[in-house]
Image (cartoon, helix red, strand yellow):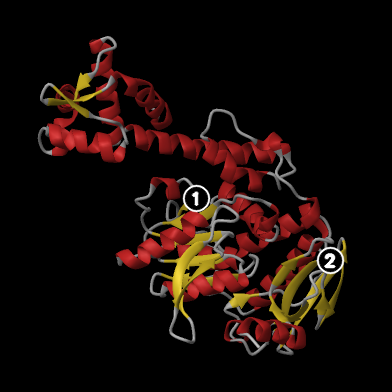
C-alpha cells in the first residue's frame, strides 16, 4: 500500500482536521474554541445563518471534517484568536457601532482611521469573498501607541495571530497556510535581509487570492520538496518606517501614531474584561460571516476616479462593505488624500527628476533621440546641490535602465535614449505626478 493510499485511508478513518471550509452547497464551516471548557468544535452553517456545533461533518467531496484538537499549541495557548460560538450579530450598523465603541475604549485612533479599522475588522471575517485585499498599518516611534492599536484592532479580527520582527518566518508561513486568518505583525522594521525578504514575499503575495509563496521544505525522509504556502488574507502591521518596495507601500492604509496627545480616558494597562468583550464581539462577527458571506461581492459603484488601478483594486473590498454613502465618500476622500501624498513623494524622487529632465531634453530634440549626457546636464542644472554635486552620465544611465526600465543604446560612441521611449517617459511622468 502506498503512502498516499495510507494517507487517504487515515482521512477516511480519523477525519480531516479543519479550521475553515467553504463548500459548494453554500455550507460554511468554522473552528470554534471554548476557553472555559477547553474544547473545540466545528460551527456549521447550512441555511444562511442557522448553525449548529458538530464534531464531524461529512461534505460533498466525501471527506469527513473534524475540528483541530484543543491541545494544539496554537489553540490551547490562544495564539490564534478564535470565536467560541456564534451569537446574534443583530444588524450591520449595530455591529459596526459596537466595534467602534470597543476600539474607542481601548485605543486612541484618529476619527477617520477608527472608522476604516472598524470596517476592516468586518472585512477580515468575509475577506475570502473577495479576490484582492488591502492591509492596515500603524506607523510611529516607540511609545506612540502603535502596538496597542495593533493588539486592540487585532483582537476582533478573523482568526488573528501575532508575530513580530523577533519571530522566525517559518512558523508564520505554516500558521498562515494551516489557519489562514489575520496576521498581526509588530516591529516590522526587520534588520535582517533574509527575514525582510520573506516577510515582503508574504505581504506582496498576500493581497491577491491564488498567489502562494513557494518554499522548499524537508520531509520526514530528508527529501527536499517544494510546498506552496497560502498567504492570502488580511494583515495589520506596526512599524517605525516604511518598506523600500513601493508596490508594497501602495497596499497599506496607514495611521500615523503619536501625532497628538493621548486621550486621558485610555487605560494605561488593558483590563481583564477586555478579553471577554473581544470574544463576545468575535462570536457576533462569526454569525455575521454565516449570514452574509454568500451575499457579499465587490461593488463597482465604489470605484474612485483619477487614481491608480491598484488603489481601486485594494480599496474596493473594504468600500463594498460601507453602505452609508456619505461615510463611503469620506473614506474615499481619505484614500485619495493619501494617494496624492504618495504622488507628491514620487514627484520629488530622483527617478521623477530624471524623467522630467529627459522630457525636457526630448522637447528640445524635437522628435530625435536624446543623449544620456543631455539628460544628465539638465538634471544637474536643477538638482546637483541636493546630491552633493553633479551626477555622472553613468549614474543617470544606470537609473534610466534599472529603476525606470527605459532602453538606452550606443550611437556614435555615446549612449542615447531612442525617440521610441518618449511615450513611455510621458506615461511614467503621469504615474509619478510629475
First in sequence: mark 2 vs mark 1: 2
Q: Nearer the viewer, residue 414 or 176?
A: 414
Q: Residue at x 74, y 90 (%)?
A: 37
Q: Quadrant of residue 352?
A: top left
The residue depicted at 77 percent of the width and 70 percent of the height is 29
Mark 1, Cα crowd under 10 Å, few <14 / some 14-19 / many 20+, is: many
User: How far from the left and from the top, in percent, is residue 427?
Assistant: 41, 26
Task: Give residue 88's mark.
Answer: 2
Q: Quadrant of residue 151?
A: bottom right
Q: Residue at x 67, y 83 (%)?
A: 5
Q: How far apart are the alpha carbons under marks 2 and 1?
A: 32 Å
- What quarter of the picture does the C terminus occupy? top left
Q: Is residue 298 above or below residue 123?
A: above
Could you tell me if residue 163 is visible in this image?
A: yes
> Percent position (x, y) of residue 270?
56, 74
Front one among 32 and 147: 32
Q: Residue furthest front?
A: 1
Vertical order, 376 against 323 (above or below): above
Q: Which residue is mark 1?
A: 252
Q: Nearer the viewer, residue 19 or 350?
A: 19
Look at the numbered disc 1 and give the secondary structure of its residue. Answer: strand
* Left or right: 197 in relation to 395: right
- Residue 267 pos. (x, y %): 55, 70
| Quadrant (top left/top right/bottom left/bottom right) for the N terminus | bottom right
Q: Is 70 placed above or below 325 here?
A: below
**Residue 334 in view:** no
- Comparing labels 2 and 1, the label whose residue is closer to the camera: 1
The image shows residue 399 at horizontal and vertical percentages of 24, 37
Is residue 334 left or right of 411 when viewed as pictured?
right
Most foreground residue, 294 or 368: 368
Q: Left of 127 or right of it: where is 366? A: left
Q: Which element type, helix, strand or loop, lies under badge 2?
A: loop
Amino acid at each position: 500500500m502506498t503512502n498516499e493510499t495510507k494517507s487517504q485511508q487515515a482521512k477516511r478513518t480519523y477525519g480531516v482536521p479543519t479550521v475553515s471550509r467553504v463548500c459548494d452547497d453554500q455550507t460554511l464551516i468554522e473552528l470554534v474554541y471554548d476557553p472555559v471548557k477547553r474544547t473545540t468544535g466545528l460551527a456549521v452553517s447550512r441555511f444562511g445563518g442557522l448553525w449548529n456545533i458538530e464534531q464531524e461533518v461529512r461534505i460533498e467531496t466525501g471527506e469527513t471534517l473534524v475540528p483541530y484538537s484543543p491541545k494544539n499549541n496554537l489553540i490551547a495557548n490562544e495564539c490564534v484568536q478564535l470565536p467560541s460560538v456564534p451569537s446574534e450579530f443583530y444588524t450591520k450598523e449595530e455591529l459596526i457601532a459596537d466595534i467602534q465603541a470597543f476600539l474607542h475604549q481601548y485605543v486612541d485612533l484618529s476619527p477617520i482611521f477608527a472608522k476604516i479599522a472598524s470596517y476592516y475588522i468586518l472585512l477580515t471575517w468575509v475577506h475570502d469573498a473577495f479576490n484582492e485585499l488591502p492591509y492596515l498599518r500603524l506607523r510611529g516611534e516607540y511609545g506612540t501607541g502603535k502596538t496597542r492599536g495593533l493588539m486592540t484592532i487585532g483582537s476582533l479580527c478573523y482568526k488573528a495571530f501575532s508575530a513580530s520582527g523577533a519571530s522566525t518566518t517559518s512558523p508564520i508561513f505554516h500558521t498562515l497556510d494551516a489557519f489562514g486568518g489575520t496576521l498581526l505583525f509588530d516591529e516590522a522594521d526587520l534588520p535582517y535581509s533574509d527575514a525582510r525578504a520573506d516577510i515582503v514575499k508574504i505581504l506582496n503575495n498576500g493581497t491577491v487570492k491564488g498567489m502562494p509563496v513557494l518554499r522548499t521544505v524537508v520531509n520526514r525522509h530528508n527529501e527536499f520538496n517544494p510546498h506552496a504556502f497560502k498567504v492570502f488574507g488580511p494583515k495589520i502591521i506596526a512599524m517605525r518606517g516604511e518598506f523600500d518596495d513601493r508596490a508594497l507601500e501602495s497596499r497599506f492604509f496607514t495611521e500615523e501614531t503619536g501625532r497628538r496627545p493621548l486621550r486621558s480616558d485610555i487605560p494605561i494597562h488593558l483590563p481583564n474584561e477586555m478579553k471577554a468583550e473581544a470574544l463576545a464581539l468575535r462570536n457576533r462577527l462569526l454569525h455575521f460571516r454565516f449570514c452574509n458571506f454568500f451575499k457579499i461581492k465587490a461593488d463597482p459603484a465604489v470605484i474612485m476616479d483619477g487614481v491608480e488601478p491598484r488603489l481601486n483594486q485594494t480599496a474596493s473590498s473594504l468600500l463594498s462593505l460601507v453602505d452609508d454613502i456619505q461615510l463611503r465618500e469620506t473614506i474615499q476622500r481619505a484614500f485619495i488624500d493619501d494617494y496624492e501624498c504618495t504622488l507628491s513623494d514620487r514627484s520629488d524622487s530622483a527617478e521623477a527628476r530624471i524623467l522630467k529632465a529627459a522630457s525636457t531634453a526630448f522637447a528640445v530634440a524635437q522628435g530625435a533621440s536624446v543623449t544620456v549626457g543631455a539628460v544628465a546636464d539638465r538634471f544637474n542644472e536643477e538638482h546637483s546641490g541636493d546630491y552633493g554635486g553633479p551626477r555622472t552620465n553613468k549614474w543617470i544611465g544606470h537609473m534610466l535602465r534599472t529603476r525606470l526600465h527605459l532602453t538606452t543604446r550606443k550611437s556614435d560612441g555615446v549612449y542615447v535614449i531612442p525617440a521610441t521611449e518618449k511615450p513611455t517617459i510621458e506615461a511614467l511622468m503621469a504615474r509619478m505626478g510629475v
